[in-house]
Every structure is written in structure tokens, then in C-alpha cells.
């Protein structure tokens, strides 16, 4: 099992000291890594594929009578088309709204009300299109009327809805950590339960994916719209990320935000989400990882009994569009009432590429920990910035290695941007020291081991790695690849990926208030990208 190479008791004692005494971090990392060579890591994962194509991964751990699960759908924002942006995230919300047996006191009475709402919503969307058509005279009276009629039917429907019944049922049965998340590359659902509740989990989750009901559709659509407003439109960090992605990518699905564009969220309808759900959430596009006090054969039998009832769906479409090569620097200015910040992205390769590991080590050398180059040079020595970091992802398709920094007054974004380039340029011509390379490898080893310490963490890693690469063992391969990175590898990737013509730069400039003592220019003058937003 996962803990064979290091006893849980010994590692628990180490982790306790690690949390309470930061001065021991380096020593403990070395202690951990000395017993965690790649050949000594033995993770006894058992796997099967159900008759409908759903993948099941099981890792037994009998230290405590509990287990954790992650079900991952291989769909994220990168799979969405124009007009569909944000659907993966919206479906994450909707899959907590219940089914024909959970979340309702009388589904047969509730069903015709939802059909009435859908009919009105079709008219609502037609009016929305007219309102946003510059060739049609503006008249929102019907739009307002349809919204009010939908709201009235929703009030009637509320009499049948049992709020949060999925979560309440899990909670009463000892469940913890019920949650979900959506990213660019996937959507995952989590829960942990006592080990004698395995069949309950299979019943509830198979019902969630097999007979979900998209109730409270239009009210939840408004909730997601507000989430977008709070996390992106009125968030400086959210606005910068959105602008960077939209500017760096012209063809890739990574060019739109996970939460979706506002106008797409406003026009979701039931038919659209049902089609998307049946395309991407069929069992042959799902992987479930179960880790804890379970018997693998029992898990497989129960999963076949419950999940196996869900019909296999069509194979999801294969994305063939690839981002063209960038041949010149892109620069964008975002005006926002927030502290100035600079963010720079360089194109980097998809997961499984040989350069993943060198890029991971390189970015860690630059910004991982107090002794990293960014921290020592840009923050401590030159005192140019309050923060500075860089990170390289492992994504399904070519993505961005991103660096960001916030200047310390009176310094400017231009100064810290140049400071970032100077540190990267040093790596192009000067080999990193053996000490730096060993330090980062040891840190990454320790981080890898710590992530094996929990049932939920292991379940997430198994499901994630399988969904991304069709092989959960990729996490071991990436671990081994990091240990093989050389000084020459770092110099090579620094030169290969970090040329000026391959970068996209977003600078956030603080908008001066009309109430400031010094004269303020009018909003909109000289603006290239607006940082505001809202309905």
C-alpha cells in the first residue's frame, strides 16, 4: 500500500514537527527523501473498467475505518465552445441539486412546473437576444415580465424541493468533505465516509450521475452570474488572469475563464445543459478513485451493481484545434482600482512532455521558499516587490508558465518586470548550483510524500492522473523525472521557452479616483482594457 515505504506513525511525527517548527523544514525534507527513492515507492492500486466504460481505482488503507472518494469527469472549460463557456462549472453546481429521488418530496408534481419554466425561459432568451441586437429597438418590458413569471413558478416549485438533501444524507451517515471543483481540464466531486457506508456512496453517486434533475436551474444561473461578478469582474486578480488567458490564446479553449463569459451565463437553457451533460458526463468519461478501509473486490462489485446501470454514452469529441505559434510579444494594460501588478505568461508544453519536469524544477528554483531567487533578489535584496512568483502547470494542452509580482512603493511594474527577466536570463547562461538543484529536488520529494499522507489526497491524485493521462502511474513517472533533471536541462528550457517574442504581459494600472486631490483623467481616456464589469 501507499505507506509501505514509510510508516504512518513515523511520518506523522515528522509532519507534526514540520508544521510546528519551520526551522526544521530542510532537515526533515532530507530525512523524508532519504527513505523515498523512486524504487521504494510501492502503491498497490487495483483497477477495473465497468461494463459501461467507467474506470474504478482502489487503494486499500486499513489504518482507520474510513474511506475517501473522488469521481472525476474528464471535462473542463477547455472543452467548451463559444456560447457554452462556463457550462462545466455550472454543471458542478447543478449536480448538487438532486435527482428524481433526492431533493424532492414529489418529483411527478414538480416535473410539470419545470416544463413551464423551460417554456418561459425560451421566450426569455429570445427577448434577451432582441435586447442585445443593435438593429432591434430596445424594449425590455417582455424580458422583465418573463423573469417575473418564472419567479412565481419557482416559488410554487420550492414547495416540493428538499434543500441540500444530498449533503444532509451524507452528513447524517458520518460523511465529511462533500465538495466539488471545476478547472480547465476536469471536474471532480469529493466525499469521505465511514467504511461501512460504501454502498450508500455508490447508490447516491450513481443516482447523481444517472438520474440527475436540473432543478432550480434559472435561480442557480443567477447565483453563478453573481459568482462571476464577485470573483472576476470586481476582483483585480481574477480580472488579470482572465485578461492574460484571453490575450495569450487565440484558438485554444484556455482563452476563456472557467466561470464563463457573462453573456453566455445569461443565456444558458435546459436543452443546452442536458446535451452537454450527456456528452461529457457519461460513465465512459468518468473515473472514480476509492482510498481507505475497503476491499477492492467489494468496491468493484458494488460499483458494477450501481454505476453499471448507467448506459454508456457516446465518446466525447476529440479537440483538434491547437494554438498557433506565438511570433511576437503581446502587451495589455488593465485599469482597475487596485494596487499595480504585472503578470507574464510564456507558452509551455502539455502534460507528458519531457520538458515538464525541467520547467517545474526551474520555476521552483526561482520562487519556491524563502531562499528562492525571486525572494532573495527581488524582494529581500532590491526590495522592489511585496510578492513575486512563477509557476509552470501540467495541463492537457499547451498552457502558460506564469510569473507575477506586485511592486513595493515607490517602484513600478516596469522595474519588477525587468527584474523577473533578469533572473530568468541568468538561468540561460549560468548553470544553477548543485546545492540549489539538490535543495529543490528534496523539497519536491518531501511535497510528493506529504501528499500521499491522506486518503482524500491520494484519491484526488489517482483520479486526476488517470483522467489526464489514462494512467494513474504518471504521478510516479513525474516524480522520477524530477529527480533526473540536470543543470543543462534547466539552461535548455530557459532558452527554449522564455524568449521575449513568446511572452504575453498584462499590467494592472490603478485608476485614479475622481475624489483624489490631484486632477484625475476621465475614465476611459487612453484605456486599452477595462477592468470593471457587471450586469
Image: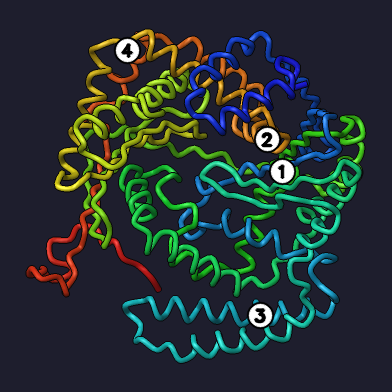
Per the image, label 3 sits on a secondary structure element best described as helix
Q: Quadrant of the C terminus?
A: bottom left
Mark positioned earlier in the residue sequence (1 or 4)? 1
Q: In which quarter of the image is residue 207?
A: bottom right
Left or right of 314 in this view: 133: left
Mark positioned earlier in the residue sequence (3 or 2)? 3
Residue located beneath label 4 in the image: 432
Q: Which residue lies at the image location 61% right of the left edge and 82% below the top edge?
A: 120
Question: Rounded to the nearest whole Å, what is the CA distance between mark 3 and mark 2?
Answer: 37 Å
Residue 250: x and y, percent? Answer: 35, 45
Q: In which quarter of the image is residue 370?
A: top left
Mark positioned earlier in the residue sequence (3 or 1)? 1
Question: Which of 294/205 is in front?
Answer: 294
Per the image, label 1 sits on a secondary structure element best described as strand
Q: How busy is the neighbourhood of tag 4: few (under 14 within 10 Å), some, or many (20 plus)?
A: some
Question: Which of 416/104 is in front?
Answer: 416
Q: How busy is the neighbourhood of tag 3: few (under 14 within 10 Å), some, or many (20 plus)?
A: many
Residue located beneath label 2 in the image: 463
Residue located beneath label 3 in the image: 117
**Mark closer to the observer (4, 2):** 4
Q: Which residue lies at the image location 25% right of the left edge and 55% below the top edge?
A: 334
Question: Rounded to the nearest whole Å, what is the CA distance between mark 1 and mark 4?
Answer: 41 Å
Q: How busy is the neighbourhood of tag 1: few (under 14 within 10 Å), some, or many (20 plus)?
A: many
Per the image, label 2 sits on a secondary structure element best described as helix
Amino acid at each position: 500500500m501507499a505507506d509501505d515505504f514509510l510508516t504512518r506513525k513515523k511520518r506523522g511525527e515528522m509532519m507534526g514537527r514540520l508544521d510546528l517548527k519551520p526551522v526544521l523544514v530542510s532537515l526533515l525534507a532530507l530525512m523524508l527523501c532519504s527513505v523515498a527513492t523512486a524504487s521504494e515507492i510501492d502503491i498497490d492500486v487495483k483497477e477495473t473498467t465497468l461494463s459501461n466504460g467507467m474506470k474504478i481505482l482502489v487503494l486499500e488503507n486499513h489504518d482507520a475505518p474510513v474511506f475517501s472518494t473522488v469521481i472525476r469527469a474528464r471535462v473542463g472549460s477547455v472543452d467548451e465552445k463559444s456560447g457554452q463557456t462556463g457550462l462545466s462549472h455550472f454543471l458542478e453546481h447543478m449536480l448538487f441539486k438532486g435527482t428524481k429521488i433526492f431533493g424532492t418530496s414529489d418529483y411527478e408534481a414538480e416535473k410539470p412546473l419545470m416544463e413551464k419554466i423551460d417554456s418561459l425561459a425560451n421566450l426569455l432568451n429570445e427577448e434577451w437576444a432582441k435586447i442585445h441586437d443593435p438593429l432591434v429597438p430596445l424594449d425590455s418590458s417582455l424580458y422583465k415580465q418573463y423573469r417575473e413569471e418564472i419567479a412565481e413558478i419557482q416559488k410554487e416549485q420550492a414547495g416540493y424541493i428538499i434543500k441540500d438533501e444530498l449533503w444532509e444524507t451524507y452528513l447524517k451517515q458520518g460523511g465529511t468533505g462533500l465538495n466539488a471543483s471545476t478547472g480547465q481540464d476536469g471536474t471532480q466531486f469529493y466525499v469521505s465516509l465511514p467504511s461501512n457506508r460504501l454502498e450508500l456512496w455508490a447508490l447516491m453517486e450513481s443516482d447523481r450521475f444517472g438520474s440527475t434533475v436540473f432543478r432550480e436551474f434559472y435561480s442557480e444561473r443567477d447565483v453563478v452570474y453573481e459568482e462571476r461578478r464577485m470573483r472576476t469582474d470586481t476582483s483585480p486578480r481574477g480580472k488579470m488572469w482572465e485578461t492574460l488567458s484571453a490575450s495569450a490564446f487565440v484558438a485554444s479553449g484556455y482563452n476563456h475563464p472557467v466561470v464563463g463569459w457573462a453573456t453566455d451565463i445569461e443565456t444558458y437553457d435546459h436543452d443546452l445543459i442536458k446535451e452537454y451533460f450527456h456528452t461529457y458526463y457519461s460513465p465512459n468519461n468518468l473515473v472514480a478513485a476509492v482510498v481507505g478501509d475497503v476491499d477492492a473486490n467489494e468496491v468493484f462489485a458494488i460499483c458494477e451493481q450501481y454505476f453499471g446501470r448507467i448506459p454508456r454514452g457516446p465518446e466525447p469529441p476529440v479537440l483538434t484545434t491547437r494554438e498557433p505559434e506565438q511570433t511576437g510579444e503581446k502587451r495589455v494594460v488593465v485599469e482597475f482600482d487596485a494596487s499595480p501588478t504585472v503578470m507574464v505568461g510564456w507558452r509551455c508544453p502539455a502534460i507528458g512532455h519531457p520538458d515538464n519536469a525541467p520547467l517545474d524544477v526551474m520555476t521552483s528554483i526561482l520562487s519556491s521558499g524563502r531562499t528562492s531567487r525571486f525572494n532573495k533578489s527581488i524582494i529581500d535584496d532590491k526590495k522592489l516587490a511585496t510578492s513575486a512568483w512563477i509557476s509552470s502547470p501540467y495541463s492537457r494542452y499547451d498552457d502558460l508558465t506564469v510569473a507575477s509580482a506586485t511592486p513595493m512603493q515607490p517602484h513600478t511594474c516596469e522595474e519588477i518586470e525587468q527584474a523577473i527577466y533578469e533572473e530568468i536570463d541568468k538561468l540561460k547562461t549560468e548553470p544553477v548550483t548543485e546545492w540549489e538543484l539538490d535543495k529543490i529536488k528534496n523539497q519536491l520529494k518531501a511535497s510528493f510524500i506529504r501528499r500521499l499522507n491522506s486518503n482524500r489526497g491520494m484519491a484526488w491524485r489517482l483520479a486526476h492522473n488517470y483522467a489526464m493521462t489514462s494512467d494513474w502511474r504518471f504521478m510516479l513517472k513525474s516524480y522520477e523525472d524530477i529527480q533526473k533533471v540536470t543543470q543543462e536541462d534547466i539552461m535548455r528550457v530557459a532558452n527554449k521557452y522564455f524568449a521575449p517574442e513568446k511572452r504575453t504581459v498584462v499590467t494592472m494600472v490603478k485608476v485614479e479616483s475622481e475624489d483624489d486631490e490631484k486632477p484625475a483623467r476621465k475614465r476611459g481616456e487612453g484605456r486599452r482594457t477595462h477592468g470593471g464589469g457587471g450586469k
